[in-house]
Image (spheres, rainbow, N blue to C red):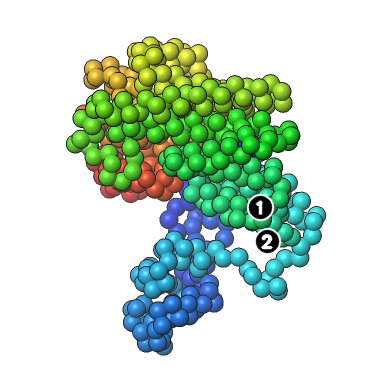
Amino acid sequence: MAHKRRNATADDSAPAPATASTNGRCVARGAGAQGPIVADHGRYHELLAMAKIYNDWTQGQLADALGRDEHNLWPKGGVLRMDIVVRLARALDWPLFAVLEDLTFHEPESDEAAPERTREDIATHNEQSFQAYLEGRYADALRHARAMRRRAEGPIDRAKALLRESLAWEALGRYNAASESLQQALLEPIADRRVTMRLRCNLAWCHHALGLAYEGEGVAAGIIEELAHDPSDDAEAPGWIAYAHFVRGLCLRLRAETLADPSLDMRPGAADEATCVARARRGSARRRALPLARRAIEDLDAARRGLRAVALLNELPYYDGLARIADGAILALETLLGEVAPEACIERVLDELESWVELPSGGGIDAEAIGWWCIFACHVVLREIDDVPTRERQLAILSNKATEVAEATANWSLRERVFTVEFLRRAGGAERAELDVDDVRVLSGVMGRFPSFRRLGWVLVRRAFTFGRASR
C-alpha cells in the first residue's frame, strides 16, 4: 500500500546527452541511456497543425511564430532546436514540459502498433514490474508497468499499471511523475475499492513529499472521512486508515512548523535570507501554530497505534518503521507546544543516535526512520537554539547522520530536507563551507525533483561552488 524504498541499483542520473539526427527524428543519446530519445516527425507536424487551428493562423503566420521558413518547418538536419520547441509551446499555450513529453514519449496509438492483449501478458508484466521494484531495478519496473498499461483491457488494468508506474517513479524520487500517474489512474472508473484506496494513500504521500501540505492533508482527510462513514471489511482497511492519519499528521506538522518558523517555508520568495530569522521569532505566528501542532499530534498518535497494530497482526515490520517516524515527529511537535524542552528533545535524539552508530543492514524503513528523526531535530535546533556554537555542533551531528541515511537508502525526500537545513543554517550566519562536486551532483538531482526547492538550490550552488571545478 505505502511506499517501500529500497537501495536503488539503477543509475537514474545519466550525463547530459549529445544530440544527433537519424531518419527524420531528433535523437538524444546519453552514456547511461538504454536507447535513443527521439522527437517524432509525425507528432511534430500534428502539433504544428494544432497550433494553426488553435490560433486560426495561416502557414506563413505559423512559420513566423516559430521563426522558420514556411517551406522548411522541419529542420533539414533533423534536430529540433530548443528555441523552436519553446516557440511551439507558446503557440499552443502548453507548458514546455508537455510539448517535450508529447514529442518524445507518446505511446503508439494505432491498432497496427499496439501489442496483442492477453491476460497472461498483463499478469507477467505486473509480476515482473513488482519484482524489479523489490530488487531496486526501478527503470525495469517502469518499463514493465508501461508495457502492462499498453496491454490493459479495461479501467482496472490501466489503474494497476499506473500504480506500478507511480511506485517506480517514487522510488526514483520523481514525486511529480508519481503524482501524475496516480491522478491519471484515479480518473479511471474503478469499482475496486482496494485499488482506489492504494492510489489515494500513495497520492497523499507524494503531495507531502513535495511539500504540498494542504493537498496531502486533503487527500488523507478524504480517506479518513470516507472510511468513517462507509467502513470497509477489507483486510487492508486498518492499514489505509492508519496510513492516512500518518500522512495527514505529517502535513499538519509541516504547516505548524512553517507557521511557527517562517524560515522553513520553501515556497519561492518566502524564505528571504535577510528576514527569515527575525520572522521566526514572532510570537504571534507561533501562537497560531499551536492548534495545528495539537491536531498533528492527535493524527500521528492515532497513526502510530494503528500502524503498530497492523504490523503485529500481519507481521509487517515496515509499518513499525512508519510508527517510529511518527514517534519522532510527535517529539518535535511537543517542543513546539512547550511540553518538552528543546534541549531535552535534542538530547533524546542524540542519545538515540548513540545506538544507531551503524545503520540497520540493508537500509530500508528502519534506517529511514533514523534520518527523519534527525531532520525533525534539526528543525527544533534551528527554531529554538540561539547559541551559535551549540547550534552548529548539533546541526553538524544531525545533518551528517541524515545525509548518511539518505545516501544509504537513496531517499531523495531526505536529501531535499538535508539541503534545506543547510540553506537555513547558512541563512542563520553559519560558516559557509564550500560544496564539493559530489554535493552538487546530489543537489542537482534534488533541484530537478522538488520544484519548490529549485530557487534555494541555485542560491546554494552559486554561493558555495565554482563551476570550473566540475571540468575533468
Q: Name which residue type carries label 2.
A: Arg
Q: How many marks?
A: 2
Q: Where is residue 215 in the image (x, y as percent from the top left)?
A: 47, 43
SS class, disc 2 = helix
Mark on residue 112?
none
Query: Whole-Å distance between the Cαs marked 1 and 2?
Result: 12 Å
| Residue 62 occupies quadrant | bottom left
Check disc 1 and report the residue beneath it.
159
SS class, disc 1 = helix
Residue 32, compared with residue 193, is above or below; it is below
**Neighbour class for label 1 at 10 Å: few (<14), some, many (≥20)?**
many
Check disc 2 and report the residue beneath it.
150
Task: Classify residue 423 as left or right of residue 62.
Answer: left
Task: Classify residue 5 as left or right of residue 398.
Answer: right
Residue 247, compared with residue 93, is above or below; it is above
Q: Residue furthest front?
A: 229
**Neighbour class for label 2 at 10 Å: few (<14), some, many (≥20)?**
many
Q: Name which residue type carries label 1.
A: Ala
Q: Which of 222 and 81 is in front in this view?
A: 222
Q: Position of residue 303 (x, y in %)?
A: 56, 26
Q: Nearer the viewer, residue 291 or 174?
A: 291
Query: What residue is drawn where x is 70% and y is 74%?
Result: 112
